[in-house]
Amino acid sequence: MNWKDLTSIEELENILQESHQHPVAIFKHSTRCSISSTAKNRLERGWNFESNQVTPYFLDLIAHRNVSNAIADQLGVVHQSPQLIVIKNGKAVYDASHMTIYVDDITEVL
């Protein structure tokens, strides 16, 4: 799984534009939380998408909480951690948190 880092609101704007070309996924991770690490590991083990199907972005929300807040505001998704959000055409089409993040569910929205 080739994560692309999301570290700024400007990058978020670019990602939202990218989502009009193909789906993107943002994983919001708390580096201080063991549940978040477990969810990330499960996601990485199950990830079976090609880069042209969905681009995965990684947000360290401890370091970049302002970006996490912008995601919640712009997409109308309640902040969670850990959280996976899939975006198509600038809109969240899937969001799940904690141990309810399932790769099979992502497949259904692509």
Image (cartoon, helix red, strand yellow):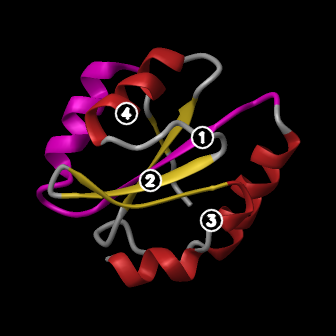
Q: Earlier in the sequence, mark 3 or mark 1?
A: 1
Q: Which residues are magenta?
A: 8-32
> Residue 23 colored magenta?
yes
Crowding at label 2, few (<14), some or many (≥20) Cα neighbours within 10 Å? many
Q: Which residue is mark 1?
A: 80
Depth check: 45 or 90 in front?
90
Label 2: element kind: strand
Describe residue 108's horizontal placement relative to residue 87 as left or right.
right
Q: Earlier in the sequence, mark 2 or mark 4?
A: 4
The amino acid marked with disc number 3 is: Ile
Q: Which residue is mark 3?
A: 101
Asked if the residue under mark 4 is in contact with the one under mark 2, i.e. CB atoms within 8 Å, the reply is: yes
Asked if the residue under mark 4 is in contact with the one under mark 3, i.e. CB atoms within 8 Å, the reply is: no
Q: Which residue is mark 2?
A: 85
Label 4: element kind: helix
The amino acid marked with disc number 4 is: Ile
Q: Earlier in the sequence, mark 2 or mark 1?
A: 1
Q: Which residue is mark 4?
A: 71
* Total numbered badges shown on the rendered structure: 4
Q: Earlier in the sequence, mark 4 or mark 1?
A: 4
The amino acid marked with disc number 1 is: Gln
- Give the residue drawn at x 12%, y 56%: 20
Crowding at label 4, few (<14), some or many (≥20) Cα neighbours within 10 Å? many
> Residue 107 colored magenta?
no
Q: Earlier in the sequence, mark 3 or mark 4?
A: 4
